[in-house]
Image (cartoon, coloured by chain):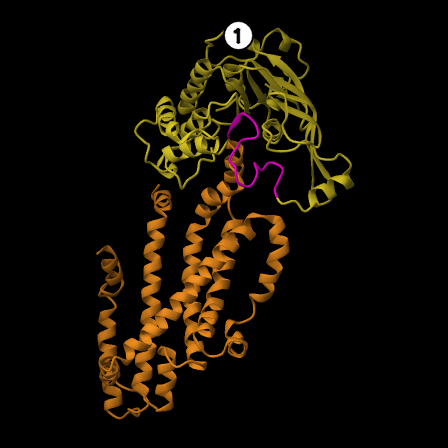
Chain colours: A yellow, B orange
Amino acid sequence: MIEAFQVNKRFSLPGGGQLTAVRDVSLSVADGEIVGLLGPTGCGKSTLLELMAGLQAPTEGRVFIDGALALPPEPSDPRALRAHRRRDRLLPPISNGLFRDRPRHDVAVVFQDHAVFPWMNTLRNVTFALRVRGVPRAERRPRAIAALERVGLAGSFDKYPAQLSGGMRQRLALARALAVRPRTILMDEPFASVDAETRCQLQDLLLELWRETAVTVLLVTHDLHEAVYLCDRIALFGEEPGVVDRIVPVTAARPRRRGGSLPALGPGAAGAPGLAERPHACCSYGE
Amino acid sequence: MRLLRNLAGAVAGAAWLRLAVPLAVLWEMVPRAGVVPRTLVPTPSDVAVAALGLARGGELLRHLASSLGTLALGLILAVTAAVPLAVIVGWNPWIRRHLLPFIQATAPIPPTAWVPLAIVLVGIGLPMKVFLVFLGAFFPIFLNTYQAIRDTSPRYLVAARAFGASELTLILHVYVWQALGAVVMSVRTGVALGLVMLTAAEMYGGRAGIGFLLVEAKEFFRVPEMVVCMAVLGAVGWCLTQLLTLLQTRLSRWREAEART
């Protein structure tokens, strides 16, 4: 369960101006739901994901992960904010502390560029995630092996990420996230950098895993078809950067047919101002 | 065995011998023909005779051992001080703001400029020599390691933190691995400068070491022995560099995998 209330995120630009990446977004992701953040590149959807993962502090508003504050917000007054950012602090706010491995929230993040560690082989990548999660030593290896086999990497335990294809690296990232059995998994355009066929396979894999584990998913994408195929609800970013135009439910029953388009967005979308008129503004149609 | 083969590989590559043999012959002929005075430019055979003489008396070995001991001590101290310090300074902005200016202010001083001060402070014994080798190696190792730590891709840090990694885990499992290649590279630079400082230290003060032997040979105008000392110092540097290259390829198997694809 992740809830964002009236979240704003502003960055100060080197020239002195301010960039609003996320503006007044309220969104809640219920347990077991797949929610999509859909919008064009640079619309602030990745920033919103990082806010909701507790990896960045909102400038205003609050984010709660399973009822706990994700990160304390930054002061809203610009002068106080400058002082806050300048303040000599030993550790950054997203740090987990000096010596004890312990996640602050029960979430796992899959990054767009997968961010698996190139100096660890696939098995080590997963056991490392389990280790910092505090999984007892004896359980790590079997769990990692099971997770890797589940995503189809059974034969590649001792391969380094550089020896894997892009799709396999993304599978590894998925295995690493799922092996820790988080309540929520946040994915930032996880399938954007693989070819169309691999993408379809990975989408189906995600749906299978979601059915098996009932994990909550928040998914960033710029592909309308992907969002319609995967999500229960879709938050649509509008033309204005950082603004969520509306949140539309996808009513089509699962398992869904691939290539569903606007009608599948359900009755709520029929009268959506802007969506039908300018679909190109909020989503690219993939390949 | 692999080590020996690697060490030999660079020499036995044979192509350079086509040039080296005629050059050696020329070097042998020119002083013998009296074109240049043989007292100033010793022939290879003169050098070989001098080397044999030095080696037979056990003198060369004694001085070499002294030099190697000093060098090893200084380098080990430099690595154990510079690498952890660089990691900590690179890791934490707060520590960086407080410590880095000191190091940046000291680093530009040419290490040889420390020689007089070191002699005044700790005399001309072993501590002075070790200290100077340490100084020569410390700054290149520190600065390169620091830079590599700073260059660590933030996405790995965010990923590790998102899974729950503490700062210590970040340092041991992310920063250090990212910087490992640069650390070994920087140690190679450190070895080169450490060798410079070793020679300088032994030439200025001390009763042992190849540098001392070199100055002694100069005092008695024994040019062939001077050449022997220079060759020995070069060989020491070369061997250490080869060793570190080998270590580097060993430690970065995952990078090799990266390069292959």
> What residue sits 38% from the left and 46% below the top?
B255
* A158 sits to left or right of B141: left
Corner quadrant of residue A219: top right
Q: Is residue A224 magenta?
A: no
Residue B115, position as x, y percentages in the image:
51, 76
The picture places residue A173, in percent across and down from the top left corner, at: 44, 30
Rendering coords of residue B145 (x, y %) = 49, 55
**Left or right: A269, with B29 as reference point:** right
Is residue A102 rendered magenta in the image? yes
Which quadrant is the C terminus of chain B positioned in? top left
Q: Which residues are magenta?
A: A91-110
Vertical order, B238 against A111 (above or below): below
> Which residue was labeled with disc 1?
A252
The chain under label 1 reads A
Magenta: main secondary structure: loop
The answer to whether one can see residue A188 in this image is no
Task: Look at the picture and state if B42 lies above or below A13.
Answer: below
Q: Is residue A69 left or right of residue B117?
A: right
Q: Looking at the image, is A90 positioned above or below residue A74? A: below
Position of B157 with respect to B95 (left or right) is left
Q: Identify the amino acid type marked 1.
A: Ala
Instruction: Give the class, few, some or many, for how many residues have Cα within 10 Å of label 1's Cα (few <14, many ≥20).
Output: some
Q: Nearer the viewer, residue B175 or A34?
A: B175
Q: Quadrant of the N terminus of chain B?
A: bottom left
| B97 to A278, vertically: above or below | below
Marker count (numbered): 1
Which sits in the foreground, A222 or A207?
A207
Residue B101 point in image, percent of width and height: 62, 60
Q: In the image, what residue occupies the spot 38% across and 35% down?
A: A124
**In this view of the protein, can residue B128 be seen by the observer?**
yes
Where is residue B18, by image quadrant? bottom left
